[in-house]
Amino acid sequence: PVVVFDNNWSSMTGFQETPGTIGQGHDPKVSIEDICLGLGVASVKVVNPYRYRTTVRAFRKVLKEKGVNVLILRAPCAARQPRKWHLAVQVNPKRCTGFSKCEKTCIEALACPALVRDGDKVRVEQEVCQSCGLCVHYCPENAIRGHLFGIRRRKVGI
């Protein structure tokens, strides 16, 4: 399977729009899905990576299918399009097993700049946190919790 991460920005070159964002002048908009199907890919699936369970299910399904399959993870760039909600993410130090006991820590797995080491435990830098909630879903000990302010999860779509 092929996994494409699409946040509609070419971040490596300074936040330029991609051909998939909008057509430039009289140039048509380019769709990643159309390109994949034109190359003869067996199936193309697009999911929102912030919908953690849906993404995991889609990835497992793509792994089982035969042939070349593409999974496109599409969501707005967190740095360019701030969330319409605020998720206050906190680590419960009593539940966090720490680096010495955790098999694969959230810091290693997610590489999130908001998750920082505090002794043997993990804490969240609120100023850096983008409120995506992936760490809440990832933690095997349920030590990381998130509380939404002003909006329900279902309405946001995560």
Image (cartoon, rainbow, N blue to C red):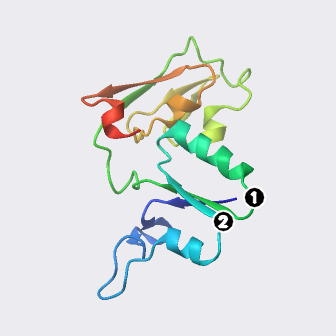
Q: Inspect the image, locate mark 2, and give the three-letter code of the amino acid beneath it.
A: Ala
Q: Residue at x 63, y 77 (%)?
A: 39
Q: Residue at x 36, y 32 (%)?
A: 153
Report whether 92 appears left or right of 84.
right
Describe the element under mark 2 as helix, strand or loop: loop
Question: In the rendered view, would you say 97 is above or below 42?
Answer: above
Q: Please report contact status of discs 1 and 2: CB closer than 8 Å, yes or no.
A: yes
Q: Quadrant of residue 21?
A: bottom left
Q: Inspect the image, locate mark 1, and give the three-letter code of the amino acid beneath it.
A: Lys
Residue 95 position in % (x across, y down): 58, 13
Question: In the rendered view, would you say 150 is above or below 59?
Answer: above
Q: Earlier in the sequence, mark 1 or mark 2?
A: 2
Q: Is there any visible trace of residue 111 in the rendered image? A: no
Describe the element under mark 1 as helix, strand or loop: loop
Total marks placed: 2
Q: Quadrant of residue 19?
A: bottom left
The residue to which callout 2 is attached is: 42
Given residues 21 and 41, the one toward you in this image is 41
Instruction: Mark 1: give few (<14), some (14-19) or many (20+) Cα within 10 Å.
Output: few
Residue 151 position in % (x across, y down): 27, 31
Seen as rendered, the residue at the extreme left is 150
Query: Separation of disc 1 and disc 2 at Cα?
Result: 8 Å
Residue 61 position in % (x across, y down): 66, 47
* Quarter of the figure with the N terminus: bottom right
Report whether 104 appears left or right of 141.
right
Q: Is there any visible trace of residue 150 in the rendered image? A: yes
Residue 66 disc label: 1
